Image (spheres, rainbow, N blue to C red):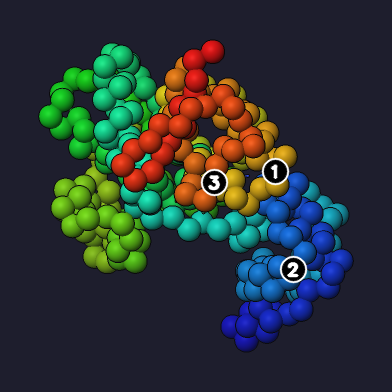
Amino acid sequence: MKTASLASQEQISQQDYESIRDFLQQSCGIVLGDNKHYLVSSRLGRLLKEQGLSSLSELAARLREDSDPQLQAWVIDAMTTNETSWFRDGYPFEILRNIILPELVAEGARNPRIWSAACATGQEPYSISIVIEEFLRNRAGVLPGIQVLGTDISPRVLEDAQSARFDEMAMRRGISGPLRERYFEKEGEIWRLKQIVRDRVVFKQVNLLQSFSHLGKFDCIFCRNVLIYFSSSVKKDILERLTESLRPRGYLFLGGSESLANYSDRFETVRGPSGHVYRLKEC
Ligand SMILES: C[S@@+](CC[C@H](N)C(=O)[O-])C[C@H]1O[C@@H](n2cnc3c(N)ncnc32)[C@H](O)[C@@H]1O
C-alpha cells in the first residue's frame, strides 16, 4: 500500500512521458498534449505494483522495447476515460424512440442494427436496448431481429458491460425509478439487468483506429464522447469509415461537444426538440 501511494506521486521524466504519450497516440489515437504529466503519473503510478514494475521509467522502457500485448492493454485501460451514464444527454434516446425506430417500422426494416462504438461499461447500448424494448411493448412483431452492438477498445470495460451488473452509484446516474423496477433485479448491493434487454445486445472489442468494415452495415451509429480525445486527422479518418458503415439514410449520433462541421458534407442534420442527429444524405 505504501509502495503504491509513493509510486503514485512519482515524477515522470520528459523522455518517459513522451514514450507513453507516443504509445497512446499510436495504439488508440488518444492525444495527451504536452502537459499531462500528472495524469500519467497518477493513473499509471497507482497500478505499477499490480504489474510487478518498479517505476514509471521501467514501464516506459518496456513499452518502447517490448510489444507485450498484456502490458499495452493495461496501459490503455488505465489511461482511457470510461465515463458514461444511462440515457446520457437524453435527446439521442428521444430521437431514437420518436424518429428513428418509427421510420424503420415504416420501411418494414428486418434485422435492423444499431452500433454503440466506444460503449464503455455498457450503459449506452443497454439504454438503446431499453428504448427498443419500451417501443416494442405495444407493437408486437415489428422490427424483427433488431440488434445492438456495443464495442470498445478496453477489455476491462467490456467485461463489466457483459456482466450487466451495476452498483448503486451507476444506478443513480440517469435511470428512472420505473425503468429500474421494470428492467433490473436486485442482487444484494448489485442491480442486474434482465435478460430481455441483454438478449439483443452483443459486445466485441474494436479499436476505432483499426478497420471495422468486418462489422457490416448499421442503420444507426452512436459514436459519442470518444472523438474528442483524437487528433483532427484521426477523427476525419474514423468519421469517413463510420460513414461507410452506415446503410443509406443511416443515422449518426456524436457527443454533445462533438460535431461533423469541417469533417463531412455527406450528412444532413435532423433536429429533435432538444438535440440533433446526423442522417446520411441520399447520393
Ligand atoms: C468517455 S467513454 C464514452 C462512453 C459512451 N459512448 C458515452 O458517451 O457515455 C469513451 C470510451 O472510448 C473508449 N475508447 C478510447 N479510445 C478508443 C479507441 N481507439 N477505440 C475504441 N474505443 C476507444 C474508451 O475505452 C472509453 O470506454
Residue toward you, 140 or 165: 140
Q: Are marks 1 and 2 in contact (CB under 8 Å)?
A: no
Q: Residue at x 57, y 37 (%)?
A: 260
Q: Residue at x 61, y 30 (%)?
A: 264
Q: Are marks 2 and 3 in contact (CB under 8 Å)?
A: no
Q: Amino acid at mark 3?
A: Glu
| Quadrant of the drawing holding the N terminus | bottom right
Q: Is residue 142 left or right of residue 11?
A: left
Q: Is mark 1 within 8 Å of ligand 1?
A: no
- Which residue does the numbered mark 2 point to in the structure image? 35
Q: Is residue 235 left or right of residue 35?
A: left
Q: Are marks 3 and 1 in contact (CB under 8 Å)?
A: no
Q: Is residue 265 left or right of residue 94?
A: right
Q: Amino acid at mark 1?
A: Ser
Crowding at label 1, few (<14), some or many (≥20) Cα neighbours within 10 Å?
few
- Which residue does the numbered mark 3 point to in the structure image? 258
Q: Please provide percent x and percent y for residue 6.
A: 68, 84
